[in-house]
Image (spheres, rainbow, N blue to C red):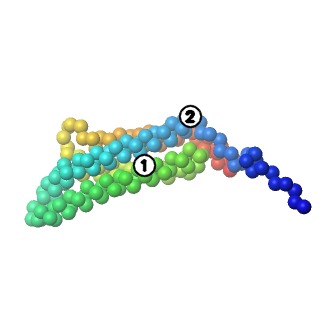
Amino acid sequence: MRPPRPELSNAVPPPALRVEPPPPLVRSVGALWLMGVVVGGAALVTGYLDRDTHLAGLRETAAGLDGAADAARLDQVAAIALWGTLALFAVVLVAEGLLVRPLLRGVGGVRWVLLVMLALDAGAVVLVFALLGDGSAGFQPTVHLAGLQLALAALAFLLGLLPPASRWFRDARSRR
């Protein structure tokens, strides 16, 4: 006869499987990354809503580069520039958003992956500025929101390098 099985719902996981909650600084870092993703999403929405304006500006730029191109070719170049820029920015934002959870679970190597993502983010924002900005001094929602998103991401990365956060990531690694 077999001994009765203990109730699984009452089982306490071994200490090695428990995840210590992150300190307030690390939670702030995660919140800043997520806030940056939300602001970047808002930039994508405004970029989509202002697509006709952006396409017109990109057509003018393409016409200035190649005056002999026909209208269909200029439309094609403008569409590739607009949708390519927005797609690159969206991919970077999704990747950054997906990396926040492992960061908050204490995977310290994610900070360095986020550094690479920050560099890619900077490149995507430079494209947004160059291709979707019109050079005027007025408020340009897509461009300014993308710049704010990059600033939030950079601030989050820098705060994640402060000694209290580094200590927590080091301790989380030693608990595994």
Asked if residue 36 shows in the view, the reply is yes
The residue labelled by disc 2 is 24
Which of the pair 21/62 is nearer the observer?
A: 21
The residue labelled by disc 1 is 118
Dot 1: element: helix
- For residue 171, side relative to residue 54 (left or right): right
Residue at horizontal 59 percent and vertical 46 percent from the top = 105
Which of the pair 150/87 is nearer the observer?
A: 87
Q: Which quarter of the rendered picture does the N terminus lie within? A: bottom right
- Earlier along the polypeptide chain: callout 2 or callout 1? 2
- For residue 58, side relative to residue 115 (left or right): left
Residue at horizontal 35 percent and vertical 56 percent from the top = 88
Asked if residue 154 shows in the view, the reply is no
All told, the count of numbered labels is 2
Instruction: Single out the residue that lies furthest toward the top.
Output: 24
Q: Is residue 147 above or below residue 54?
A: above
Instruction: Single out the residue that lies furthest toward the left.
Output: 68
Circle 1: residue type: Leu
- For residue 147, side relative to residue 102 (left or right): left
Instruction: Residue 54: give x, y in percent of width and height.
Output: 21, 50
Instruction: Residue 147: give x, y in percent of width and height.
Output: 33, 42
Which of the pair 111/47 is nearer the observer?
A: 47
Circle 2: residue type: Pro
- For residue 92, side relative to residue 145 (left or right): right
Instruction: Residue 148: give x, y in percent of width and height.
Output: 35, 40
